[in-house]
Amino acid sequence: MRMLILSSKEGLQKEVGNISKIELAIKEFIRIKKDYDIRFCYYDQPNRYRVKPVKKNAMAIRDFIANLEVKWGEIYILVLIGGDRIIPFHKLKNPCDDNDRVVLSDNPYASRDDDFLIPERVCARIPDNHDVNFIINQLKKTHNITKASFGMTAKVWKEASKNVYRQIGKPNDLKVSPPITLDNFKSNWLENKDLLYFNLHGSDVSPNWYGQDGDEYPIALSPLNIQDATGVVASEACYGAYIINKSNKNTICLKFLNQENVLGFCGSTTIAYGPPAPPSTEADLLVKYFFEYLKHGMTLGESLKNAKIDIARKALRRHGFLDDDDQKTLLQFVLYGDPTLRLI
């Protein structure tokens, strides 16, 4: 099974400085992952396949991957090393009438044709966090099984969130905000868990996630609450995976990934949609399917890829087309971390 690890030498050096330790960590990662045929290359440097290097441009990098695939063979897994300033997100037209000018997406990297909605290969990104050790730590992570989960929702979405959380835990164990807020949130709730689920409000400006009860929007979670967290995180928060010009100090997703035992983060780069009550649709349905595949032993990368495929299939069976909200959901959800990790 072919896996390509891709980055920019020039971009990495600008963001984190000396990259020799990262290159050594990637070599060790390749040595350990014996089930995969792995290649590592920089899109802006000469390579063994004589594919012409390209500049930092999302479509040019996508073409570079396609050209390399012609020379090497079908790539099943793609791991992007670095944030937007190293490997840019694709800035796609927003299919929804909301405040997002574009949708930040990695879907085109996962697709071989001009229809970016449905991924054809596993794609994950390891953000740089402006820190050599942050990248290295993502490549070293392993997991101890606990068979325990944690979930938290805004009160307004309580019933819808219960329907998702029942895939991984008891619905009545779900924490609800309010009454749970920043002040009474207990950090040890996040310890010794396999799966962490959040259905809260988020922002591309604020570092916090918020609950809701009517017109009340209390802070439910901040980066300061995250200590000794473990497992795989899936969040429906708007901008939950937004990392442009962010670090682990001012965004929750990078704070989670900065934890030694958090394996990965699945979330949305832009405004996400979900129902106030069952049945599950849009972001609720994607996370629900993601959890189902993880529980059946699939890797993080396979779980997100299959969840997106299942959403598309279900919409096509029901309506014969993908509506605007479905399209945006498929484009905006990304995976951060090692996509080969699994829970069982």
Image (spheres, rainbow, N blue to C red):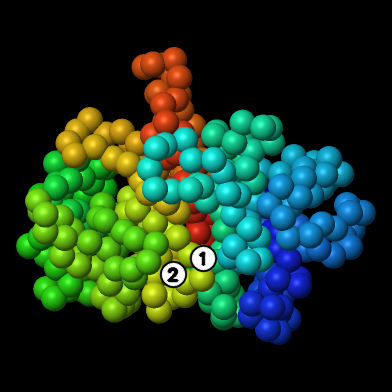
Query: How many marks on residues?
Result: 2
Rendered view: 117 above or below 134: above
Q: Residue at x 52, y 51 (%)?
A: 104
Q: Nearer the viewer, mark 2 or mark 1?
A: 1
Looking at the rendered structure, the kind of residue marked 2 is: Leu
Q: Which residue is mark 2?
A: 254
Compared across the picture, whether 60 is left or right of 218 comes to right
Q: Earlier in the sequence, mark 2 or mark 1?
A: 1
Neighbour tally class for label 2: few under 14, some 14-19, many 20 plus, Cα within 10 Å: many
Q: Which quadrant, please, contains the N terminus?
A: top right
Neighbour tally class for label 1: few under 14, some 14-19, many 20 plus, Cα within 10 Å: some
Q: Nearer the viewer, residue 55 or 224?
A: 55
From the top left corner, tell me how far across and down residue 88 is, in percent: 63, 58
Q: Which residue is mark 1?
A: 244
Compared across the picture, whether 201 is left or right of 266 comes to left
From the top left corner, tell me how far across and down residue 39 is, in percent: 76, 57
Q: Which element is circle 2 on?
A: helix
Q: Quadrant of residue 241?
A: bottom left
From the top left corner, tell me how far across and down residue 257 is, in percent: 44, 69
Q: Nearer the viewer, residue 237 or 306?
A: 237
Compared across the picture, whether 156 is left or right of 256 comes to left
- Residue 332: which numbered mark, if any? none
As drawn, the residue found furthest toward the left would be 179
Q: Residue at x 74, y 52 (%)?
A: 61
From the top left corner, tell me how far across and down residue 93 is, in percent: 54, 40
As drawn, the residue found furthest toward the right would be 50
Q: Residue at x 32, y 41 (%)?
A: 273
Looking at the rendered structure, the kind of residue marked 1 is: Ile
